[in-house]
Amino acid sequence: MKKLIATIFASIFLFSSHSLAADLGVTVGFGLNTNLGYAEATEDQDDSRSSGKATDDGVFVDDSMGVFAEVNIGERISVGLDILTDSYGTPEAQNEQNGSTNKVQVDFEDIRTLYVRLGLMGGSYFKLGHVSGNIVTNEVMATSSQSGSTVGDQDLDGTTYGFGYAWTADNGLQIRAEGLYADYDTFSVTDTSGDIYTVNKMESVTASLKVAKAF
């Protein structure tokens, strides 16, 4: 999928650089997002008292805000960058082990989406892009064997696509509503105590309401 996205971006830039007839414009705006996330992870314990694997999954919902800018190539093609101005994250999870409480919570920060937007019929459009950012793990491991263990921050990479609709006034003011699905790369990480965490699946659905101005 990444190769396909790279090919699409390369083709668009090649087209825009050689098509003198294409009208270039700029659109800037901001948006409010509601993010529904899902992840499945496996923990492989490295503990002298217990060993083995345990798999668990979870769903979370959180809101975020973002700003974006697009270069419009003709009437139907736009290349843009969307940047979240705040982070979003999971609720805090807790478990009891050996009389102590372990806590963990994950934030998704510095989320950027490089995308292409293709105009369809009316004001509808299709959007395809690459998502990148950071996964920050906030944890308190209180059990004696895991005391002080930490999981390092990880890179977030994925592919997103979906559809939207833009209402455009005569003065270039736009109101957009869109829904995007994202599928993220899997990864494994070893914490400082030796436990291995493998993210087997991570995906999200985002609903957005945006306001923009085309120039």
Image: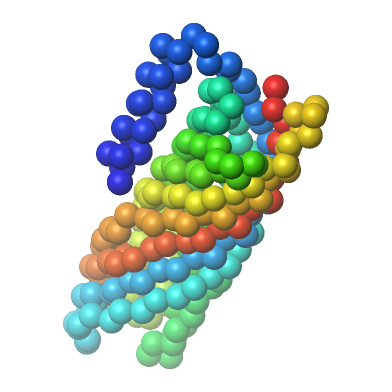
**What percent of the width, then of the height, locates residue 186?**
30, 59
In the picture, residue 166 is in which quadrant? top right
- Which residue is more in the foreground, 116 or 59? 116
Q: Nearer the viewer, residue 31 or 176?
A: 176
Give the vertical position of 190 relative to 97 (above or below).
above
Residue 118, image x and y in percent? Answer: 51, 37
78 above or below 215? below
Quadrant for the C terminus, please: top right
Q: Is residue 170 left or right of residue 127?
A: right
Q: Residue at x 53, y 16 (%)?
A: 22
Lateral position of residue 102 relative to residue 10, left or right: right
Of all residues shown, which one is farthest toward the bottom? 99
Residue depicted at 49% across the width and 73% down the height: 59
- In the image as oriented, which residue stretches furthest toward the top? 20
Q: Residue at x 22, y 86 (%)?
A: 50
Question: Is residue 139 shown to the viewer in this render?
Answer: yes
What is the total number of numbered labels drawn onto the structure image? 0
Q: Is residue 110 visible?
A: no
| Residue 57, position as x, y percentages in the image | 39, 76
Q: Quadrant of residue 25?
A: top right
Query: Looking at the image, is 215 positioned above or below residue 18?
Result: below
Image position of 175 (left or right of 42): right
Camera-nearest residue between 198 and 120? 120
